[in-house]
Amino acid sequence: MYVAYNKPTKTFYARWREKQPDGTEKHFSVPLMRRSDQYHSKADVRKSPEYKSILAQHGEPDFDAKHAKLLLAVAEARGKAKPDAADQAFVERVVSDDTAENTLFVTFVEGTYFPWAEASLRAKTVAEYRSMWTRYDIASMVSGLRVCDFETKHSANILETIAANHDVGKTTLQHVKFLLSGILILAKNKGMYKHANPVQDTMLPKARGARDTHAYALDQILAMLRLPFDAMTKAVIGVAGLAGLRESEIAGLHWGDYDGIDIRVLRSIDRVTGEPNPPKTPKSAAPVPVIPNLKQLLDAYKATVALDSDGNPIPDAPMFPGQRQKYADLDKLALRVIRPAIESAGLSWYGWHGFRRGIASNLYALGCDDLTVQRILRHSKVTVTREHYIQVRDEKVDQAMTKLDEAITTENGKHAARVANGESN
């Protein structure tokens, strides 16, 4: 008997062959469970009550066939003709300890961590982690290293090598550090690592700072809305620039999430799978007020969609449906429709998140304090709003530079007058 895994259905099976009275062999396959956090490898399944029950029903010992010789040797050493339960428990303990001691870091990541991540994390996060693992060839940096031997110096070497060979910023290095830390945390929970997480003490190497981020000014947003877009595109831009929703939240809106006064964020669309997930955080589900100017855009768009018998949009229908999928791909909408139009009008495209930074900066410039802006953006911490979203110009600096320009203009005027009068410099 052995454990098999079916990738399309993400299901583990117990499979075996039995000899029939006519001399032929019959194959049996029994579904056990779907892959999950608890059962994400064949080794986990072999320890499950379901698998052990099937083994007991067919009179097979509860251990991997490759350890049969070890079990017999233990029984003989104890003077027994056949191994008993105590011998089997001893062998299982030895095998478990041997696995924990000798599993390679690369084997654990590719065979255990990523399957666990696929079952537990958002598809977008897993895709980003797999991309980092492959793009920076981290496997080659830990080749031959066992999980149990991983130390702070190894994570430091990984980060330093990436910084030296790639044009990355500190944010990217921090994400790699998150990946390494998550791997060690899972290893510790699986009994394969017995020390404190060594990645936590790893210092980030020198790297370039974050690239400049941009926030749309209010006049830029209004200029976009004056362009001859269709009603849906204007509504999308309006929700982004006048309500500050994230791109994935805009894509996941249903008409039932909007009551004419507020928008409630109930789902976030994964950019990899196109499937809905719960909001990013509990605070992300807070209602977002719809101002009259945005309501006009939504009402104009609502007049173009299918209505139910009461004259309202179907509540469960996506507000912004895709052409070939349930939810719209806003990146494609920006690439094919919005960006060409606004650039032709002399405007710049800074991505969807530029609208979110824009509403933060515009509200702050209008006198809203940072705590209020945080509530509107639904951030968990005001420091995130303050440090990464609100972009302000120092009025005193602007005034000082204006005075300098005026002084230069005045002096140039005086100089021109002296020259005209034949005076020397």
Image (cartoon, helix red, strand yellow):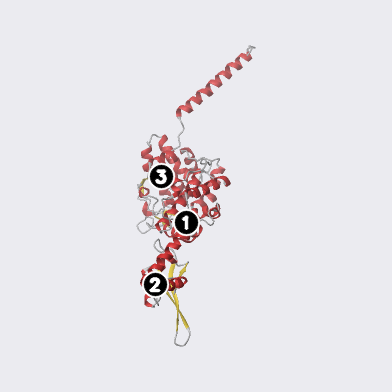
Secondary structure of the residue carrying numbered label 1: helix
Q: Is residue 389 visible?
A: no
Q: Amino acid at mark 1?
A: Val
The location of residue 408, given as percent across then percent down, is 55, 21
If the image is split into quadrants, where does the N terminus sit? Answer: bottom left
| Residue on which disc 2 sits | 78
The location of residue 300, given as percent across then percent down, is 42, 49
Nearer to the camera, 85 or 246: 85
Residue at image point 38% right, 37% down: 370
> In the rendered image of this protein, does residue 71 appear above or below residue 381?
below
If the image is split into quadrants, where does the C terminus sit? Answer: top right
| Residue on which disc 1 sits | 147
Q: Amino acid at mark 2?
A: Arg
Q: Please give the label number shown on residue 243.
A: 3
> Which comes before the other along the chain, label 1 or label 2?
2
Q: Residues within 10 Å of mark 2 (few under 14, many from 20)?
A: few
Residue at image point 42% right, 40% down: 360
| Marks 3, 1: nearer the viewer | 1
Residue at image point 38% right, 43% down: 381
> In the rendered image of this protein, does residue 246 appear above or below residue 391?
below
